[in-house]
Structure formats: structure tokens, C-alpha cells
Image (spheres, rainbow, N blue to C red):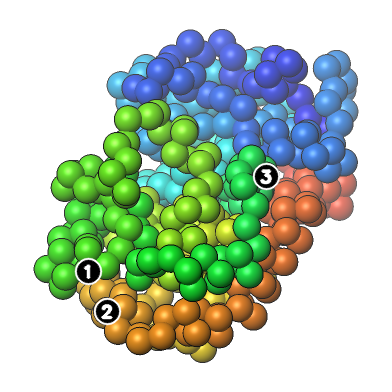
Amino acid sequence: MNLMFEDFKERRNLINCDDMTKGGQPRFQVSPMINTMCRMKFQSDLIEHTDDNYLIATGVNGSIANWAKGSFLSEKSMFDYLSDNYLKKLRDGTAMFLADFSLEGYHVDWLFDWFHAEAKRLHIPDQCIVYVTGNMLIAEQYEEYADMRGIEDRIKCIPYAGFEEFISIQRLKTKQYTIDDDILFKEQNKTWTFNCPQKRARNHRVEFFDKMAKNGLVSKGLCSFPERGIYILGEEHDKDTGYYIGRVHPEYCLKTFVTVVSEPQYYEEELSTFTSEKVFKPIALGHPFIVLGGQRSLEVLKSRGYETFSDYWDESYDTLPDNQRMDAIIELLKYIDSIENKVEWYKSLRPVLEHNLDQFKENCSKEDIAITELKNYYQEYFYDHKIHQLEYFYD
């Protein structure tokens, strides 16, 4: 697969855009997926001058309106920053364009309409657009959208759990504990029922913390939530966001029996199920987990080879409506807290914990399924199928 960049050193495209996000970052950045492909050498070539087929990739971040339409940043669409040469290549079917939003899982109901409208406005084939996102439901959401509208010429949507491999790198920077070490610590030290680190005050996190407080659970766990003045072991959240994203903290798992993963998206109206770095941290540490996230979060993890804990507790919460899902997780925490001999119970989880550790290492040592899907689509677009000419674009 050939990759083309305007800035090869930084692996960036759309570099003529000088808009900055509210967080002070460039509006368009390096694509996380492409960066991983280049770093791990997954059969990709960087080409500076060629008439061959190639992929134009950019990373996007922040809110969708900001990177797509422009919003407060500028009046220009993302596609307005494509060079004349890039547009020519896209129009004649010898280039593809990839927008990589895999660092986030946000979704909005107008995004698919916008992609198709932009393709029509710029006279480029819909099929040359690839959208990569951390929303793991995106492919089926788009297929449903396109089927309902009878759309034949479709963009390509790929869900990518890029934080999995990222956490594998971060894990190597921390002290290594085995499952035996974990059990021995729990036998010899005070251990809380659960840990639940929450930093940014999102609506579902406020609601969940208040439910924990109402049910007497806050004192049972290592909880952090600056919104309510609560910090794990007295640790204040005074560092930048990147520090907490990359930190893998074994102590939280050593001192608790289960991790409550509080994902950024939760409500059905958010149209997203996102597997962020938060869910891969307990997996990488050999710790059991409960996911306070979008519906079907456990289903997504199973599709990546992981096992969950349905043999040990009720995981039906994963498919319940918003209000019922949160209450079910509260009841689950109360159940785990009520277990008398938690250490022996924890030992019984060992087969799942060991499997997940092995699966994590395997997943992170090979090409991700999303990268394979991209490479297959690239092959299909340029070689296996004749690109039909959309002559009406030029009428």
C-alpha cells in the first residue's frame, strides 16, 4: 500500500491549514492508524513522487463539527484543504482519502450525509473516502444508513481500537506484576472492592457517582472524581490529560478486586460504543472489569478475542437501556462487595484473567484487524474492481 504525505517527516497531510483546536493542537494531525502501520512496518510504502495509486491520510481530533465543517475554526470544510493534485488523483480514481478519528468515539447523525455531500460537491467518488473511528459500531451504523437510502456508491467505514496497542507500549514502562503477585498482595493487604477512576465530569459519570454515593459504595472502592472532590488515595489530578491517558497504574488493580471502566460515551443518544485506553488498562494488568460505557461494549471486546465474566456475575447490563444499565452495574458492585471470601473468589477468575493477558499480547503483536481491512479495501479499490467512471460528475 502506497502512502503519500505533504510532510513526510511528520507523516501529515492538509498542512496548508493553520487552524488550531481549543486545546492548542493542529486541526489536522498524523493518522494514528497510519502511524502504527509505518512504525510496525505493516507492508506500506512511503512515496514522495509517483503516478501510482496511493492513500492520502490525515488524523482528526476534537469535535466532529470542528474537524469536518470547520465550526469556530474556519468556514472551510476538511476537504477544502486538499491540494489540486490530490483532488485530481481522487477524481481520476488513483488516490484514496482517509480521515482517522480513532482517538475518539464521538458520532453525529449528520456525518454520513456530509461525507456524501462533500464527495458530490468536489466531484470525487464516494468510494475513495475511508473513515476510521474509535466508535466500534460505525460499520454497521453506516450499512444501515446506506441500505435505508438505497445508496450503492458507498464510503468505507472502519472501526479501530487503536488504544489497545498504545497501552501495550505504556505497560512496558511500569513495574510488572504477575497474577500470582496480585493474589499474594490481596492475601496480605487491605483490599477495596473496586476501583473507579473518573476525571472529566461527563453527565453519566456524575449520575453514576451520585448513585454510588446513595448506595454507600464510594467508601468501598478507590474512587476518584474531582467534580465531587474525591481523589484516589489522596492523589490530586493536577497533571495534563496526556499523562493520565498514558499512565498504567498497577497499584489500583493490586488494591482492588475489580475495575469499573468509565468510558467517555454511555448514553444511547450518543450513537457510539468506544473502546478507549481505559478498558485496555485492566486487561493489560490481568484484572477483572465492568464497563460503564455504551451498549454492547462487552460484545465488542469478545469480537477481539477477549473473555468476559458472565460465568462469575450477571453481565446482562451490557445490553440494557441507559437507566437500567447503570442501576444493574450498581447492583453488581453491591453483589461483589457482599462476597465474604473475596480472595478465594478472585482466584476463581484466574482462567479468564490469564486468557485475556495472552489475548492482549497476541493482539498487540500482530496486524490489527482494522489495518487488514484497510489494506484489503485498498486492494479492492485499485486492483480487484474496475473503478467505474462517475461521468455525471463532469456533466
Identify the mark nearer the N-term, 3 or 2. Answer: 3
Residue under pointer 2: 334
Disc 3 to disc 2, C-alpha distance:
34 Å
Residue 172, disc: 3
Residue 60 vs residue 162, the one in the foreground = 162
> Element at badge 2?
helix
In this rendering, does residue 172 appear at all?
yes
Pick the quarter of the image with the C terminus: top right
Is there a contact, CB below 8 Å, between mark 2 and mark 1?
A: yes
- Bin the neighbour count of mark 3 within 10 Å (Cα to Cα): few under 14, some 14-19, many 20 and up: few
Q: Is residue 195 above or below residue 11?
A: below
Quadrant of the rendered image containing residue 342: bottom left
Amino acid of disc 1: Leu
Quadrant of the rendered image containing residue 31: top right
Q: Residue at x 22, y 48 (%)?
A: 230
Amino acid of disc 3: Leu
> Element at badge 3?
loop
Apparent side of residue 67 relative to residue 55 in the rendered image (left or right):
left
Apparent side of residue 375 relative to residue 250 in the rendered image (left or right):
right
- Bin the neighbour count of mark 1 within 10 Å (Cα to Cα): few under 14, some 14-19, many 20 and up: many
**Residue 389 percent coordinates (x, y):** 73, 40
